[in-house]
Image (cartoon, rainbow, N blue to C red):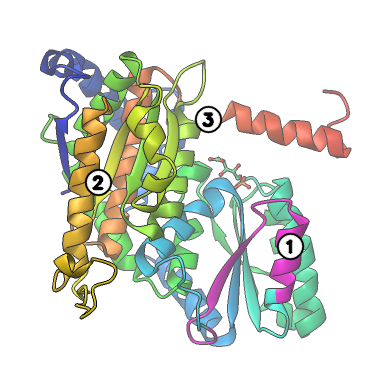
Amino acid sequence: MIKIDISNVWGSVEFADLMAIEKEVAAAHTTLADGSGAGKEYLGWMNLPTREVTPEITRIQAAAEKIRANSDVFVVIGIGGSYLGSRAAIELLQGPNRNMGKGKGDPQIFYAGNSLSTRHWNELCRLLDEKDFSIAIISKSGTTTEPAVATRALRWMLERKYGTDGARERIYAITDPVKGALRQMANEEGWQTFSIPPSVGGRYSVLSAVGLLPMAVAGMDIQAVLSGSMDAKESYDLRSYENPVWLYAAIRNLMCRHGKHIELFESFEPGFQMFGKWWQQLFGESEGKDGKGLFPVTAEFTGDLHSLGQMIQQGRRNLFETMLRFDPPEQVCTVGSDVKNLDGLNYLAGKQLDFVEENAFLGTVAAHVDGGVPVITVDCGTLDEKKIGELFYFLELSCGISSYILGVNPFNQPGVELYKRNMFHLLGKPGYENM
Ligand code: PA5
């Protein structure tokens, strides 16, 4: 189980506050588990964890093996919940530079359809030049503009390169089982498809084929991811403050009530950046409605201590931090000794880099707490596939409970839908003339 240390929040919240909110946490958990709350038709994510090797998992693994064998590059087309989760998992586990030196057998993974930038598009075309590649088109609705534009161009690129039949072997669609333009197109063109259950919303879909196919292509053990999420499903059903989900959801809401309206979610791992972005979408879209919610911000230390650190330490006192810690890897790294010692670093000679990092962490927490910034520390233990599955479920459950305490529907995103419709209208999409 993940361990949460809340010893650095006292002063901003009192023990009595924690006791007082306990009933609300219990009620929110029951509402979620009973499926009796707002957005109850979108609770399918709670059934995604499994320890079984289902036919769907076997199909995902077979598709991933084929892609790994025939592609130098795998392009994941999708935006928001349709790509953030897989990218988060892959980069947290394999590092932000995992693509370096990769090719057929263990393909590079690029992402498309998450912006409308011509520069990004030109760069992708250059990167794909002369490469064998496959694509996964991921869209729950099947109609989102950014991935749709990227799909049209990339599938044509594939068809020009491999012919229609050859391209068909390299295109995978992950979408609604019945509805939407992508489903219709996939059926018509004969592409291999995977379904996103209608009861699973975009930002809660990482443990479906949406997240699992790219993770499997990256060489991750997706059964371990799912089994970690199943462990989480079982252990985090506990109905007391011994459950770290309860503590996290309670403290977040208390912070919000006490004027700490910004949550900074951070870690000391550079590979954490996309995981932070996944968390940002999960909590931002789930809670940010009806004039409520904490503003989610993400950072990687120590790098961001040299940019955001000053603001955290001495800026407006409206934020708190949630800091994820992972055990150091087995392979250690030691600071060397230098005869001249011109950089004055010999006082660290022989010390492991983890020792330096641990002290940076302790120093950071002490400084921020001194500066009036409460810090929740989340001790995640070993970073591996199982832990990633556990973290995904832990945070999804925390988000559902936290949102119900806040009094919002965690499973809709009316603001995002409005942006999508406005764009259809402005671009002249038929059917969106009168808005
Ligand atoms: O959580 C959500 O539902 C959204 O943020 C979606 O993930 C995002 O808008 C992409 O939508 P789609 O998968 O329908 O293309």
Please report the residue visible at 47 percent of the width from the left and 47 percent of the height from the top.
277
Mark 1 residue CB less than 8 A from any atom of ligand 1: no
The total number of labels drawn is: 3
Q: Name the residue under label 1.
A: 121
Amino acid at dot 1? Trp
Residue numbers of the magenta segment? 103-126
Residue 113 sits inside the magenta stretch: yes
Please say whether residue 41 is visible from this viewpoint. Answer: no
Looking at the picture, tell me which residue is in the foreground, 251 or 142.
Answer: 251
Q: Say which element carries label 2.
A: helix
The amino acid type, in three-letter code, at marker 2 is Lys
**Cα distance, mark 2 to mark 3?**
22 Å
The foreground one among 345 and 86 is 345
| Quadrant position of residue 185 | bottom right
| Residue that carries the numbered disc 3 in the rendered image | 412
Does the residue at mark 3 contact the one at mark 1 (Cβ under 8 Å)? no
